C-alpha cells in the first residue's frame, strides 16, 4: 500500500466512509458540518497521536515527540488565526497533518533503531465479529 492509498484510507475511516467505496463518496463532515479533504486527513492523523511512550520507555525521544506535537498544535492555531480564505485554512490543515505524521515517524524510527518494539496496525475487513 503506497502512501497516497494509505492517506486516502485514513481519511475515509476518519469520515466514516468505507475505504472500498471509492466511486461516489459523500462529502466529509465533522459534527455535521462539511470539511475539506485536508482537514479530514489531519483529523485522522490526530486520532493516532501516541498517548503513551513506545514500550513504556520515557526517554528524550518521547519528550521530543511530545514537544513536536505541542509545537504543531501551537503553529496550527497561529496559522488558523491568520487564515483569510479557504486556501489558507486548507494549507494550515495540511501542514498540521504533515507535522504530526513526521513527528510520529521520527519517534518510531528512533525507538526502532534503539531496539524497542514498534507496533504495527493493520486494518482488516469487518467480518461481523
Image (cartoon, helix red, strand yellow):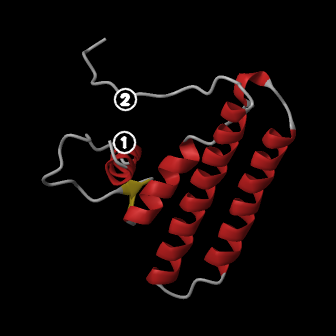
Q: Position of residue 52 (x, y in %)?
A: 73, 31
Quarter of the figure with residue 86? bottom left
Q: Position of residue 95 (x, y in %)?
A: 57, 68
Residue lying at the far top in this picture: please name it. Answer: 129
N-terminal label among 1 and 2: 1
Quarter of the figure with residue 61? top right
At x 35%, y 54%, the residue is 4
Foreground residue among 124 and 127:
124
Which quadrant would the C terminus be assigned to in this image? top left
Q: Is the residue 15 above or below the residue 56 in the image?
A: below
Which residue is under mark 2?
123
At x 45%, y 82%, the residue is 87
Residue 35 in view in this figure: no
At x 62%, y 42%, the residue is 49
Q: Secondary structure at mark 2?
A: loop
Relative to 65, 129 lies left or right? left
Which residue is under mark 1?
13
The CA span between labels 1 and 2 is: 10 Å
Q: Count neighbours of disc 1 (C-alpha within 10 A) and say few if under 14, some if 14 to 19, many if 20 or more.
A: some
Q: Is the residue 60 above or below the residue 29 in the image?
A: above
Whether label 1 touches label 2, CB < 8 Å: yes
Q: Secondary structure at mark 1?
A: helix
At x 28%, y 22%, the residue is 126
Which quadrant would the N terminus be assigned to in this image? top left
Amino acid at each position: 500500500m503506497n502512501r497516497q492509498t494509505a492517506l486516502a484510507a485514513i481519511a475515509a475511516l476518519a469520515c466514516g466512509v468505507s475505504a472500498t467505496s471509492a466511486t461516489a463518496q459523500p462529502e466529509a463532515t465533522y459534527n455535521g458540518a462539511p470539511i475539506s479533504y485536508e482537514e479530514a486527513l489531519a483529523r485522522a492523523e490526530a486520532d493516532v497521536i501516541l498517548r503513551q511512550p513506545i514500550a513504556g520507555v520515557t526517554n528524550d525521544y518521547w519528550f521530543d515527540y511530545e514537544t513536536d506535537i505541542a509545537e504543531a498544535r501551537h503553529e496550527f492555531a497561529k496559522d488558523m488565526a491568520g487564515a483569510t480564505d479557504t486556501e489558507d485554512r486548507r494549507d494550515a490543515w495540511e501542514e498540521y497533518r504533515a507535522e504530526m505524521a513526521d513527528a510520529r515517524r521520527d519517534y518510531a524510527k528512533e525507538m526502532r533503531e534503539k531496539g524497542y518494539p514498534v507496533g504495527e496496525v493493520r486494518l482488516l475487513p469487518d467480518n461481523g465479529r
